[in-house]
Amino acid sequence: MSYPGLVAETVKFKAHNGDEGEAYYARPSGAGKFPGVVLIHHMPGWDEWITEAVRKLAHHGFATIAPHLYFREGPGSPDDVGARVRAAGGVSDEQVVGDSRASAAYLRAQPHASGKVGVIGFCSGGRHAFLVACKAPGEFDALVDCWGGNVVVDDPKALNAKRPVAPIDLADSIKCPILGIFGNDDENPNKDQVNRTEAVLKKLGKDYSFHRYDGAGHAFFNASRVAYRAEQAADGWAKTFAFFHKHLG
Amino acid sequence: MCSYIIEKAKLVGTAKGPNGPWMKVDTANVYYDHPYEAQLDHALCVDFVCEAAGGRERVAIEISRESVLELMEKIKAALASGDASHTSAAACSLNGSQADVAALF
């Protein structure tokens, strides 16, 4: 079922540490109780494609919020703000988890919320989504990891004070079902890392489904980039919507 | 890549964007990753910033790997030819005779 009529806007929410955060929020305009999705943006930042992805999920019936994880480095254009964050070594896992949990709380507080909330992330956001499901297992009902890099950590330089733990080492905490979407030509995560992630989830007895696409690399959902792969992206989105409908309603 | 790993180079100089004023720069943040704007899968990205002024403004480039290699060669060539001509000029102005100087005009 699709919902062509949408309400989409930037909103304020009480973020990690009590900070006043900024987020992009879209929901179907019709009456009804809608499941929610927290969408965690990719490493380039809270940009135009992220707002498109939020509206796409709303079109398919999910009240979706994308917190601006870099708002503390604003104001400015997404690329400039993202460059500042990169120069500062990125955002801390603790802060991202806090902002994501606060976003889920925002969704559940809305009058049209069903109470079910999933989380999806792209690129670094895929890793963040995985981490959020580990750190707040009772607060998310479904997880979609789209090509999250460094869930498995092979490069010691990827671990530091801001990102002290490889998310895979926390995977036993995950309680919700997991959908993983990956491109076989991706370098981060590469095929071996995806296989090792799957092996851990299988060993732990998690409810997961991984989908790997030939002819696709990183960020292949993004129609404005050369990485876009129309056929694989359409299938990946369809699997995402079906997964969220199954587990969120 | 999609990592936060960057290389930092200390600089002395200025940089300018198309519509902005010249700004002092003291640092280049260098990384090879997915670019923001360039239609390339990966790009060498350089953000020229002034950390002494807070580092909030930047002049940025995103260029292909092949472009980087050519640019590096051209930079080396420009430095070599510049050094050669400057050395020649210095020798003339500092050590040359009056006749040498007169011969320049």
Image (tube, coloured by chain):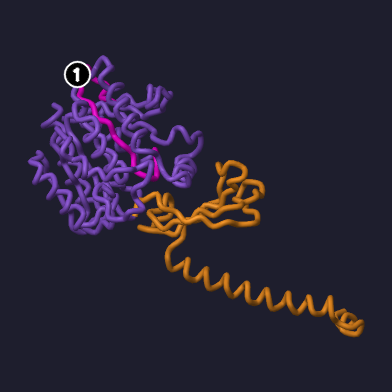
Q: Residue at x 15, y 54 (%)?
A: A195
Instruction: State the image quarter where residue B79 is shown.
Output: bottom right
Horizontal side of residue A161 vs B72, given as left or right: left
Q: Which residues are magenta?
A: A27-47
Residue at the far right in the pictured view: B98
Location of residue B45 in the rendering, given as x and y in whole percent from the top left corner: 46, 56
Q: Quadrant of the N terminus of chain A?
A: top left
Location of residue A97 in the rendering, given as x and y in whole percent from the top left corner: 31, 33
Q: Residue at x 25, y 29 (%)?
A: A4
* Membership of A240 in magenta stretch: no
Location of residue A16 in the rendering, given as x and y in whole percent from the top left corner: 37, 27
Q: Residue at x 24, y 59 (%)?
A: A185
Letter of the chain in orange:
B
Instruction: State the image quarter where residue B84 is shown.
Output: bottom right
Residue at the far top in the pictured view: A111
Counting every numbered tag in the picture gives 1
Foreground of the two, A27 or A249: A249
Q: Quadrant of the C terminus of chain A?
A: top left
Tell me the subunit letter for badge 1. A
Question: Is A171 placed above or below A31 here?
Answer: below
Location of residue B48 in the rendering, given as x and y in whole percent from the top left corner: 56, 52
Task: State the hue of chain A.
Answer: purple
Badge 1 is on which residue?
Answer: A33
* Membership of A37 in magenta stretch: yes
Horizontal side of residue A156 vs B76, given as left or right: left
Foreground of the two, A39 or A16: A16
**Three-letter code, disc 1:** Lys
Q: Residue at x 92, y 82 (%)?
A: B98
Q: What SS does tag 1 mark?
A: loop
